[in-house]
Amino acid sequence: MRTVDLILRKRGGEELGVEEMQFLVNGYTSGEIPDYQMSAFLMATYFSGMTDREMSALTEAMIASGQTVSLSDIPGLKVDKHSTGGVGDKTSLICAPIAAAAGVVVPMISGRGLGHTGGTLDKLESIPGFRTDLTVEAFRAQLAEHGLCFIGQSDEVAPADKRLYALRDVTGTVESIPLIASSIMSKKMAEGIDALVLDVKVGHGAFMKKQVDARRLAQAMVGIGRRLDKRVQALITDMNQPLGYAVGNALEVMEVSQTLQKAGPADLTRLSLELAARMIYLGKQAASLEEARKVAEDRLMDGSAYKKFKAVVQAQGGNPQALDKFELLPNATGMREILSPRAGYVSAIMAEDIGRASSMMGAGRGRKEDAIDPAVGAILEVKVGEKVDAGSVLCRLYYTGEENLDEAADLVEDAFRISGARPEVRELILEVVS
């Protein structure tokens, strides 16, 4: 078997078999296949696509490239949730405690933010003392005791994906739906989970800008899960404006605390409850989705989800008091208001621009090794559809240094579109793929 022959076949649109996918993945992971040949294969895939069988074969080969986490000795079904990334998307920190409080075992292996989208690990690490670098043994012990644990991806889990992702990033092949689907699912399936709920974002602040592409990605990931005998459901959700009001790590933790105490934004609460309900249903803690929705709402309203989150924060070395006393979280030293230039209705809030502005102030990173400032970010004062007066506050920027502040403020001001007519209401949950 020669790598060049497989490149030529993929370039010609042919389907590769299981052994051929294993040959490519194993060869690249071991260093026998050089970057230039794998780059050619990735570009051929970008243009020719993959069949369902190929995506499953690639996913399984990437899973087999490293260790898999065995959670079989922990009672109960294990259900994770994954988002494709958005602005102000802190639903993992809300739906996971709700599902865990309902009896679902939630092994939450999360990532860091890159570019304009935030990362779950970065948000959690803004809580003083919180540790995400747990050993597998500590991870398993916490799951057994609390039913919920947040950690980062280990270098031993799906190492082929880590190498391929880095190569895709510098070869212009990131946007390939088969490669995205295989990347996400290889990491998730290596966790030892039984089921997975996916939140596929679409819109200005999402990786997928068009709903048809978001649907294709959701269908690809659900299909991979089904062929690997896992229960998978996907929601396609709107990301044209930020989710909730807070954007920035410590600011988002504050909003998570408020939401778990029944005082959060309507859009964030609604989406978190729906994601939690599907985790509860797939985790067989409810006989129907309707019943699961009621269970999720009950666990939020009776305070048990908030209690679960505080217990997990303490178990992972964090200070749970910071969830009630926000002065214990990192706080910005300066604040700038962004005012409405005229009266009217907020017709759009360009989510990516809000995310980029927050990142410029230090809330995000351009490269994986960049340090972030957990205190900075933005808090919206209005959402799409609301009426505003000239000179009223649209958004507040929180900063610790003035470098890039003016540029960030200009970006945020331009992100708000004010019109004379109230815009049509856009649905938050656009589709379900299962």
Image (tube, grey):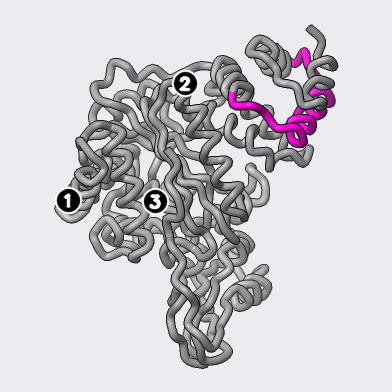
Q: Is residue 204 magenta?
A: no
In this rendering, the answer to whether 132 lies above or below 408 is above
Q: Position of residue 96 (x, y in %)?
A: 33, 43
Q: Quadrant of the C terminus?
A: top left
| C-alpha separation, residue under disc 1 versus residue under disc 2 | 33 Å
Q: Residues under labels 3 and 2: Cα distance?
A: 26 Å
Q: Which residue is mark 2?
A: 228
Q: Position of residue 423 (x, y in %)?
A: 49, 77
Front position among marks 1 and 2: 2
Residue sitting at x 26%, y 42%: 289
Specify whether 155 is left or right of 298. right
Identify which amino acid the numbered label 2 is placed on: Leu
The stretch in magenta equals 30-52
In this image, 137 relative to 285: left or right? right
The residue carrying pointer 1 sits among few (fewer than 14), some (14 to 19) or many (20 or more) residues within 10 Å by Cα, namely some
Where's residue 92, x and y in %? 39, 46
Nearer to us of marks 1 and 3 is: 1
Q: Quadrant of the N terminus?
A: top right
Name the residue beneath numbered marker 3. Answer: 91
Mark 3 or 2: in front is 2
**Residue at x 59% of width, y 68% of height:** 401
